[in-house]
Image (cartoon, grey):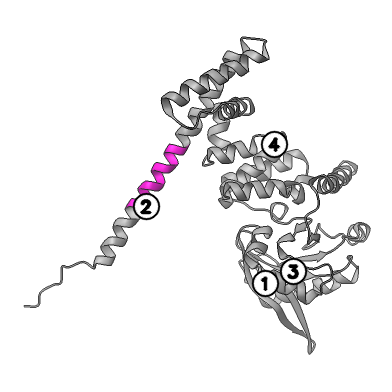
Amino acid sequence: MKKTNTFVSKNYLFDEVSKLIESARSKIAYTINQEMVLLYWNIGKIIKENIIQSDRAEYGKQLIQTLSQQLTEKYGKGFSAQNLWYMVQFYETYPILQSVLGELEGLSWTHIITILPIKDPLKRQFYAVLCQKERWSTRTLQDRIKSMLYERTALSKLPEKTIELQLKELKEKDKMTPELVFRDPYVLDFLELSDSFTEKDLENAILQALEKFILELGRDFYFVARQKRITVDDIDYYIDLVFYHRKLKCFVLIDLKLDKFRAEYKGQMELYLRYIEKYETENDENPPIGIILCTEKSKEQVELLFLNNEQIKVSEYLTKLPSKEILAEKLHKAVLIAHSKIKSH
């Protein structure tokens, strides 16, 4: 009679037990983080309520300094005067506990204190939701805020109610929209290009720094091809870069230009889009989207050609990140123009 082998592979057993341990650790870490965030909110609430009882600003400083010394002596690190002030600011920014549990679920304390200085609630919510969905590290979150990601999205130029709705649907239904995905301008300072470069140089630099480029594009972009050849009427054309966006379920074609946007660039991109839609897009996928990356947008031409409202997006790119003041001014003007157009319609 043939005996059945009852021995289990050592590697299999190790892998299965490891999965259980990792899962438990992850749940424990999540629970500890949530409890810590709630603790800090409650500490901020108690301190704020005590400070309010006195009109003297010096009283608040003295109270927090004394409390910090007492807590540090008994519980160790984590209760510096600066951190206690963050807790007060945390409570002031989110005075309703339910909003803390809902809006900031899963964020660490370092993530939270990074977004606390943002005064605009919608902008703060944008970074909180994207941070959760794309699992940004604190460093990535800081970089995104520094490069003014929110202002560079089309979302920031929409009416407030639309912004609220799109962020709500992203958080609750994981629904990503083009307004959340595409940016203008794109910041490509990591390419380290010289002052004079060719389209080939730009393309090569992007491919050499592909991981950072995709990080700038945003999560869910997957690289498909470079210089993708398509043949129409026996004529070969080459699409600079082709990506696929998992959430939007469509191909994203990128055409790189070294100059200001020109009207003829639209026709070229339309040809690429129609070809990809006809020959490479599956029935359950959405039509492809094209991005024309230029050094300048030529805003009137873009407006007259009804671009950015269609499948074609025209965006500027910056190979060097300007000062925050210059970038802020540039983006502020773009937002004002967009809002004035919304009101006129």
Please identify the residue farthest to the left as the structure is shown. Answer: 1
Find out whether residue 26 is within the magenta segment: yes
Task: Identify the disc placed on residue 22.
Answer: 2
Residue mark closest to the camera, 2 vs 3 = 2
The residues tagged by marks 1 and 4 sit, at their Cα atoms, a distance apart of 34 Å
Going from N to C along the chain, the mark reached first, 2 or 4, is 2
In x, y percent, where is residue 178?
Answer: 71, 55
Position of 125 relative to 85 (above/below): below
Residue at the disc numbered 3: 254
Q: Residues within 10 Å of mark 2 (few under 14, many from 20)?
A: few
Tag 4 near tag 3, CB within 8 Å: no
Going from N to C along the chain, the mark reached first, 1 or 4, is 4
Residue at the disc numbered 1: 207
Q: Amino acid at mark 4?
A: Ile
Please identify the residue farthest to the bottom as the structure is shown. Answer: 234
Tag 2 near tag 4, CB within 8 Å: no
Going from N to C along the chain, the mark reached first, 4 or 3, is 4
Q: Which residues are magenta?
A: 21-33
Residue at (81%, 45%) from the top-left corner?
Answer: 328
Q: Amino acid at mark 1?
A: Leu
The residues tagged by marks 1 and 3 sit, at their Cα atoms, a distance apart of 13 Å
Q: Nearer the viewer, residue 181 or 169?
A: 181
Find out whether residue 186 is within the magenta segment: no
Going from N to C along the chain, the mark reached first, 1 or 3, is 1
User: Which secondary structure, mark 3?
Assistant: strand
Residue mark closest to the camera, 1 vs 3 = 1
